[in-house]
Every structure is written in C-alpha cells, then in structure tokens.
Image (cartoon, coloured by chain):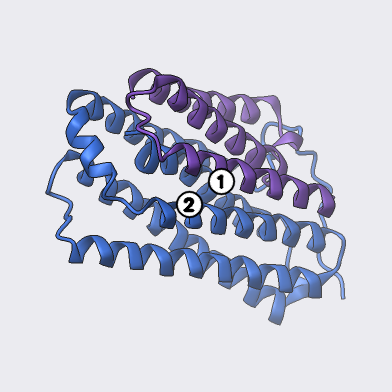
Amino acid sequence: MEKKNLLILFILIGMTQVSAFLGVFNLGVVNYLTWLVMGLAAVKFFLVAFVFMELRKAHFFWKFATVLIGLLVVVVVGFWA
Amino acid sequence: MEIKAQNIDHKDIFYPPGGILLWIIIILELITFGLGIGGLVYYGKLEPELFHQSRIQLNTSIGTLNTLILLVSGYFMANTVLKLKSGAIESAKKYLVWTMLGGLLFVGLKSYEYVEKLTGDLYMGDNMFFTFYWLMTGFHLAHVLVGLVILVFSWWQIKTRPRSLQVTDLESGAAFWHMCDLIWLLLFPSLYLIF
C-alpha cells in the first residue's frame, strides 16, 4: 500500500510539472491547452480523493458527490476560460 | 502499545472514511470554492486582457512548488493513517511530523508570496483578479492553518495518550488535510495558469 501511495505521488508530481510547463503558454487564447491543464487537475483531484483520502472505500453517494463537483469545476473553467 | 481500532463499514453511507460530519464539510467547502472559481472565470471572460496581465504577475514557480509541497504532505498523511492502522505508532508519528513540516513549508512559502505581492503594490482592491486571488488563496491558507492545528493536536494525542486514540480521530484530521489538497488542486490552475 505504501508503494502504491509512492507511485501515485510520483504520478501527481509529474502531472504538476506538465501543468506548470503548459502555463508558460497563454492558455486563455489556446483553448485546448486549457482543457488539458484542467483535465490534468481533474485526474490529480481524483487520485488524491480516491487513493490518499480512501474515497474508494466509501459509499457510492460520497464518490458521486466528489466526482460531480470536481468535474463541474473543470468543465466550467474549460468552457468559460 | 495498541490503539483503538474500530470495525467500521465505510460502504455504509453514514460512515465515510473520516466521518460523515467531516464529509459534509468537505462537500460544502468544495462547492464554495467551486463557486468562487466559477466567479473567477466569469469575470475573466468579461475582462480577458486585465486578467491575463494580472495573472502573469503571479509567481507560477511558487504556486507550482506549493502544489508539490501539499501533494508530498498529503502522501505523508496517507502513510500516517496506514501506519496507525497497522499499529506502527512510531512510524505514524514520524510521518505525521513530516506532514506538519510540509504544511509549515506551504504557509512559509505562501507568506513569502504575499509579501512579494504587497511590496509590489498588488492589493485586494486593485482589480477583480486580485480580489479573487487574495480572497481564495487567503481562505485556503486559513484552512491549511486550521488543518495544522488539528494535526498538532493529533500528534500530541499520539505522543501522550496513544491508548485513548482512535483511528477514526486521525482519519478525520487526515480527511480535512486532504481537503486542503483538493481545493488547492483546483485553485492552482485556475489562478496561476489559465488566464
């Protein structure tokens, strides 16, 4: 389990580095990069929630509520920004 | 030395890991910050050039570093709970200390960033972007500080009264700490990268 957590941490760090690199570009102009950055944020959000917070062990309601809010924020930013 | 383990079925809707009260708080906090981010992108659409010029005045390196610090701290927190559940109290204490150090580092770096902004005359009332920046990062920082207080209390309890400690107590503190991660993971790209 500790090894799994460490692997997830490395994946999270890698995705953060990619997001930071993409931030060099003017994302407000290049819309698909905005989606990419927010998509990475969503994956990181779900990994922390399901692995570190152990949301995977919880009732479907809590999984659904968390995923719904995370996706809503990502979609709102992706469409509007 | 043993800690009190409870056989809880987390699949029961009333017993999510960390407790139902904390999860109600987590969902409400995510909605609140989500609405804030919604407001940010709405006003960003009205004044795209102003938001872009303001955004590039933020220090993306510090934002990235703070993200990494919170993620590593979250990893230590997850391991703290794992170790405590397996009865390895000394390891749990060690991981908890590293978690708190991560939190302190985040607060220190955020304070440095705030000083940088204040000395650069970038205040809350300057424009709508900085209003959102100060309010949302400020509220997030307040949550991190509350999380740190909870962690210090948990650490003190493990250190002085391990027999009275229940895993669910620490799980609640861990869930709050991870909530700070979740909020920041949405705030960071919205404030530092998108506009």
Q: Residue at x 27, y 64 (%)?
A: B116
Viewer-side residue, B156 vs A32: A32
Furthest residue in direction bottom, as rendered: B160
Dot 1, crowdedness within 10 Å: few (<14), some or many (≥20)?
A: some
Q: Residue B25 location in percent, x, y?
A: 49, 43
Viewer-side residue, A56 vs A12: A12
Tell me if residue B132 can be seen.
no
Q: Amino acid at mark 2?
A: Thr
Furthest residue in direction front, as rendered: A25
Q: CA distance from mark 1 to mark 2?
A: 8 Å
| Rendered view: A51 above or below B137 | above
Give the labeled residue for mark 1: A17
Chain letter, colour blue: B
Furthest residue in direction top, as rendered: A79
Residue B107 located left or right of residue B98: left
Tell me if residue A65 can be seen.
yes
Residue A37 located left or right of residue B192: right
Q: Residue B178 location in percent, x, y?
A: 58, 50
Q: Secondary structure at mark 1?
A: helix
Q: Colour of chain A?
A: purple
Q: Quadrant of the N terminus of chain B?
A: bottom right
Whether pointer 1 and pointer 2 mark residues with C-beta atoms closer than 8 Å, the reply is yes
| Rendered view: B154 above or below A1 | below
Give the labeled residue for mark 2: B64
